[in-house]
Image (cartoon, grey):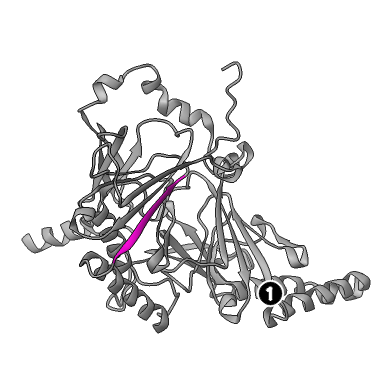
Amino acid sequence: MATAGRRMENEKNKPIFCELSVNDLEPEITEIESLCVECGKNGITRLLLTKIPHYKDVVLMSFECEHCGYQNNEIQSGGKITEKGIKITLQVVTSQDLNRQIVKSDYTSIHIPHLDFEIPSQSQKGEITTVEGIIDRSIRALEQDQPRRREEFPDTAVEIDLFISKLHALKILDEPFTIIFQDISGNSHIENPKAPIKDSQCTITHFKRTKEQNHILGIYPDNEDVLLKPIQEGEYPLEQLEGEVLSFPTNCPDCNSPCETNMKLTNIPHFKEVVIMATLCESCGHRTNEVKSGSGIEPQGVRIEVTITGKEDFSRDLLKSETCDMEIPELELEVGPTILGGRFTTVEGIIVAMKEQLSSSTAFTGDSTDPEIVNRMNMFIAQLEEVLDGQRKVTLILDDPAGNSYVQNLSGDGPDDRLKITKYDRNFEQNEVLGLNDIKVENY
């Protein structure tokens, strides 16, 4: 009975989305009998809930019909829809770029400006593929009805044959081309073969969804109004929030199991009010601490440069907001705002967090691990360890367009030789990302 109880407890605490491992010879696969769209008989759909390193939780689906042989493979995000959509622009220059792993959702449209070719989001399901795989799938789709077209519409068939030859030329890379992925759900991803160094050929921007795009995803503003109504009516005034620890149910960001998040409003000396949130998952043991600004967006952005020379600099308090980019030029390291999220820690703590994230994740390389990427990752982790041991002098740069990031001045309000703070005016693109260009304050 005790053994059975422990087994049930282990099953209960087991994460919903588990990482695939060579030691896990029998991953938990769910089989469902479902209708075959080709022959109308029943086939088998297999579902696997797993995690993609450097990305998120996903549901892999594989259908096979034993009657007609029809097969279909799809991928869907297992996490929540992000607050903004994502646009990824990739410059394809070498054969290595053709082999980049792509994770695309059902809501991803693809555009190749060089050929004025666009694949609508409705025409291809979510999948894990490569740039070359997307081109091959497009070629197969165009070739599918060519025999019929040659009989009924010969002129159209000739034009399509010419376009197919242009798609084949993309794979030969006669000249570089650009491919653009736009996903309103924000759940698409492209492999960075240079990780953890910045990908100079890939540009990622986030955009605010339109009302129509929210409706496609099933998001309606009325639902948000209902959730915010108790706070708007003054049920939780600011005086009551200060000093109080509030708890609310959520899902673990690592395994997606139900857990609780604790939230507290506090003041950072010489800065502003912030909201600190901490989550502990009893299923997988994952801990996360996140911080968000308790006030609005500042009139100007801020760029903070701190030169790390010793233990004194490591002990500086540091607030990185969820809109802040981070950079260490000496290591050619650039970290986007979504990688570590918002954090209230120290200079040492933020570098340790980067090191731990790289150490705990393997590079996103599909079915095998590229030795070159593994070696590069290990060398980079070793460089971070040298920084933490005080063997390397580096500069940590925080660039926050919202102006909500902070590094402690060791001299109080006086001059600090190793700390440089620069305020700057945001450009149109930065205001667009923050949603400020659409704000209307006239007659408010």
In the rendered view of the protein, which quadrant contains the C terminus? top right
Q: Main secondary structure of the magenta part?
A: strand
Residue 75 position within the rendered picture, expressed as x and y whole percent measured from the top left: 50, 63
Q: Which residues are magenta?
A: 393-400
The one of 307 and 205 positioned closer to us in this rendering:
307
Residue 403 position within the rendered picture, expressed as x and y whole percent measured from the top left: 43, 39
Give the answer, above or below, for where 33 lies relative to 267: below
The one of 361 and 253 positioned closer to us in this rendering:
361
Please name the residue shown 37% across and 21% down the image: 230
Q: Which residue is mark 1?
A: 176
Q: In the displayed structure, does residue 220 sit left or right of residue 169?
A: left
Residue 412 position within the rendered picture, expressed as x and y whole percent measured from the top left: 24, 38
In the rendered view of the protein, which quadrant contains the N terminus? bottom left
The one of 255 and 376 positioned closer to us in this rendering:
376
Q: Amino acid at mark 1?
A: Pro
Residue 232 position within the rendered picture, expressed as x and y whole percent measured from the top left: 40, 20
